[in-house]
Image (cartoon, rainbow, N blue to C red):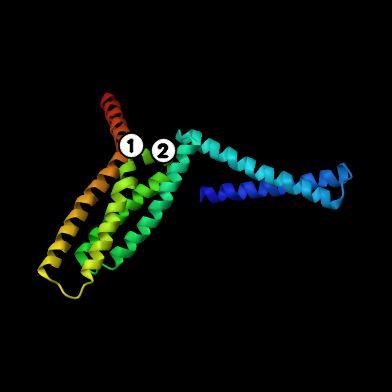
Amino acid sequence: MKTFLFFMLRTFTAGFAMVMIWLISFFGFDQSFLWSSVFGLIGGTAVYYGMKVGTQSQFLRRNGLTRKEYKLVEENLKEAKQKIHRLQKAFIQIQNLTNAKQNFETLRVIYKIYNITKKEPRRFFLADEFYYSHLESIVELAEKYTFLASQPAKTVDLAKSLRETRETMDDLVKLIEQDLHLMIEGDINNLNFEIDVAKKFIERK
């Protein structure tokens, strides 16, 4: 929502600047209609991208990131979005009520990590193992589990593979939950500190 508002603000400001530059060029400097339009377009474009760069620079400073670091985070978020889509697709095909509930909770945790990173990209580095390893692993295992579960003939070996795959996925889910905890550990500590301060204040009163 905030991104859309910034986009609208840049567009409106650039449009206003373009009109003003055209008017000044046409009436103030007696330029032709064509050249006034060219100057207006160049000026409006410069204002639009100038505001965009300024907004992004402010965003990077607030998050304590360099442009290179932010580009890295953006690339990983883009890849993560595709992996999450694959994971959802695999989970949908697993028609088991117990698994469905667990899969929903897993997706909820994964989306939480993704959305926190998108909102505060500096936290990416607190859970980089999630993006570099854990997410990819659980996607591949879920797709493998879906493939095996769809086989018509359920042999002993197949049942064993299904069980082992599910158990490994469960272990990965625990690691992903730890990834989320690492991301918000600082917030938890801050909250506990504020609670302690509030308790001491109440006790004094």
Determine which residue is flagged by label 1.
Answer: 187
How far from the left and from the top, in percent, is residue 27?
87, 45
Q: Residues within 10 Å of mark 2 (few under 14, many from 20)?
A: many
Q: Quadrant of the C terminus?
A: top left
Quadrant of the rendered image containing residue 47: top right
How far from the left and from the top, in percent, is residue 69?
45, 38
Disc 1 residue type (three-letter): Asp
Upstream in the sequence, badge 2 or badge 1?
2
Horizontally, is 143 left or right of 170 in the view?
Answer: right
Judged from this view, the residue extending furthest toward the right is: 30
- In the rendered structure, are the residues bearing label 2 and label 1 in contact, judged by CB atoms less than 8 Å apart? no
Q: CA distance from mark 2 to mark 1?
A: 14 Å
Q: Is residue 187 above or below residue 205?
A: below
How far from the left and from the top, in percent, is residue 128?
34, 42
Disc 2 residue type (three-letter): Arg
| Residue sitting nearer the eye, 80 or 51 | 80
Determine which residue is flagged by label 2.
Answer: 122
| Residue sitting nearer the eye, 79 or 21 | 79
Q: Nearer the viewer, mark 2 or mark 1?
A: 2
| Residue sitting nearer the eye, 71 or 195 | 71
At 55% from the left edge and 51% from the top edge, which residue is drawn? 4
How far from the left and from the top, in percent, is residue 129?
31, 43
Judged from this view, the residue extending furthest toward the top is: 204
At 16% from the left edge and 75% from the top edge, which residue is drawn? 153
Q: Is residue 79 above or below residue 93?
A: above
At 23% from the left edge and 63% from the top edge, which residue is drawn? 145
Under circle 1, the secondary element is: helix
| Residue sitting nearer the eye, 193 or 168 | 168
> Visible in this render: residue 100?
no
Judged from this view, the residue extending furthest toward the left is: 156
